[in-house]
């Protein structure tokens, strides 16, 4: 049998029924409040990837084409490269900082 020692305000709880209620409350808090909140956070990060990847796949070629047609858009390429380099968390999509460096280099070639 597992011994559970629960202390509240420096006093150990002796009542076994109260120990069971407190243990169930802690388990319920973890299962029904903390874990769903973590799931919401993970869902938001997956949703961010779902919207970010197509935006990059469509937006960067359009910026490059616009940079070739209208030289003023090279500034937008530099801004996009800096954003991808510094402001996108590497944990979400690891290759984005490298893409930022490539965009800034591409502007120097254009």
Image (cartoon, rainbow, N blue to C red):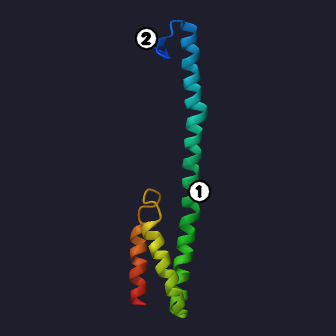
Location of residue 23 by image quarter: top right
- Residue 31 located left or right of residue 87: right
**Residue 107 placement (x, y as % from top left):** 43, 85
Picture disc at residue 3: 2
Query: Which residue, given by chain and number where applicable, does mark 1 sit on?
Result: 47
Mark nearest the camera among 2 and 1 is 2
**Residue 21 placement (x, y as % from top left):** 59, 15
Indicate the secondary structure of the residue bearing disc 1: helix
First-in-chain label (2 vs 1): 2
Location of residue 66 by image quarter: bottom right
**Residue 110 placement (x, y as % from top left):** 43, 90
Q: Closer to the camera, 102 or 33?
A: 33
Location of residue 86 with respect to 37 vertically, above or below: below
Q: Which residue is drawn at 58% across and 41% down?
A: 37
Q: Which residue is drawn at 54% across and 12% down?
A: 19
Q: Residue at x 41, y 80 (%)?
A: 104
Point out the residue furthest to the front here: 9
Location of residue 91 with respect to 1 vertically, above or below: below
């Amino acid at each position: 049998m597992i011994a559970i020692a629960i202390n509240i305000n420096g006093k150990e709880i002796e009542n076994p029924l109260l120990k069971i209620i407190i243990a169930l409350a802690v388990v319920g808090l973890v299962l029904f409040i903390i874990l769903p909140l973590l799931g919401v956070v993970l869902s938001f990060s997956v949703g961010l990837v779902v919207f970010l990847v197509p935006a990059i796949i469509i937006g960067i070629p359009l910026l490059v084409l616009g940079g070739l047609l209208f030289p003023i858009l090279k500034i937008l390429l530099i801004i996009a490269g800096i954003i991808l380099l510094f402001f996108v968390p590497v944990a979400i999509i690891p290759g984005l900082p490298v893409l930022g460096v490539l965009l800034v280099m591409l502007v120097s070639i254009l």
